Every structure is written in C-alpha cells, then in structure tokens.
Amino acid sequence: MAVDTSEIAVYRRLFDTKYQEVEELLADLPGAALTWKPFEESPWKGPSGSLGWLIAHAISSTVYLLRRAEWQMGRVEWVQVNGDEGDEEFGPANLDPAYLLARAKRSQEWVHSFLDSLSPADLENGKFHPVSQRPITVRYDIQHAIEHFSQHNGHAQLTRQLWALA
C-alpha cells in the first residue's frame, strides 16, 4: 500500500496524531482531574494551567489558526476568525471528560474538512495580520497549529502524569 506523501496528507496525519494524544489524555479520566493544577504559583511564568484548560486551548487554538488560514484565502471575514467554541473556549462544559472528547472529535472532523478543501496552491496564500501587520501564510498557520497543539498536548501529558502521582 502506497503512502500519500503530499504536504496536505502529512498535515492530516500530524493532526490525527495530536487528536489521538487527546483521546489518550482523556481515557478513564475523572472530571475532577480536569481542574487540577500541579501548582498555583511559580517563580517562572506564574501559575500552571489545569489539564482541562490545556486540552480545551489546544483544540480551540487549532481551529482559530486554521480559520485564520481560511481568512487568508478569502473564505471568511476576519470577524469569523475564532476558536471552535468562541468565548466559551473554557466554559463549564469543558469540565466533563466526555464532552471534551466529543469536542475534540468535532474539531478533528472540521480539520479534516478544512484540509480536504485545500489544493497545494492554497498553501501559498498569505496576508498581513490585521493587528501585528506581520506576514502570515496558510502554510505557516497550518504548521503553527500543529506546533501549538503539540506544545499544549505535551504540557497536558506532563500535567496528567503529575495528577496521577498526587
């Protein structure tokens, strides 16, 4: 069986790996674990995030960055660039592991739809960010989404390990 090595197929596999990590993080997890923090204060960069916050932000920021890519292609207006749950990114529903897992699955389906809609030429689209005025491209935002997702999943994995020891 041949493996699709196209850039977009590689992105799909990387995102699928990140979503699989979220499933592993939430497996057999009680709701109380989602609000647990390993510490409140730190001499370096302040408080830690809770496990639920880390997972919710990983999901939301992925959608935000890919919607920003849609904006660059002219598919949406800037005001439509937001995470999957808008202002409710960290709402109370996210304190339920089953809800958070369903949210991750919805987000993954949306990511697949987004990637399916792309052509290789779409990756070249770019604009200047409306606030910072720095140049961004569709390719950059996809890669940034994978990197950001990876970073927060790593934090969540460490937090889950520490919760298990507490």
Image (cartoon, grey):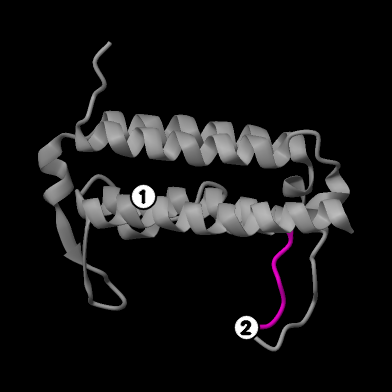
Label 1 CA crowd tier, 10 Å (few <14, some 14–19, many 20+): many
Q: Can residue 99 be seen? A: yes
Is label 1 in contact with label 2 (beta carbons under 8 Å)?
A: no
Residue 47 on the magenta span: yes
Farthest residue to the top: give it: 1
Q: Is residue 69 left or right of residue 155?
A: left
Figure check: 43 above or below 19: below
Task: Identify residue for label 1.
Answer: 67
Above/below status of 101 relative to 152: above
Determine the residue positioned at 72% across, 58% down: 159
Image height of 93 relative to 90, above or below: above
Query: In the image, residue 87 lies at what x, y percent?
Result: 59, 58
Q: Position of residue 73 (x, y in %)?
A: 19, 48
Q: 78 or 165: which is nearer to us? A: 165
Q: Quadrant of the C terminus?
A: bottom right
Instruction: Name the residue rendered at 28%, 10% in the picture.
Output: 1
Give the labeled residue for mark 2: 45
Q: What is the span of residues highlighted in magenta in the rendered image?
A: 45-50
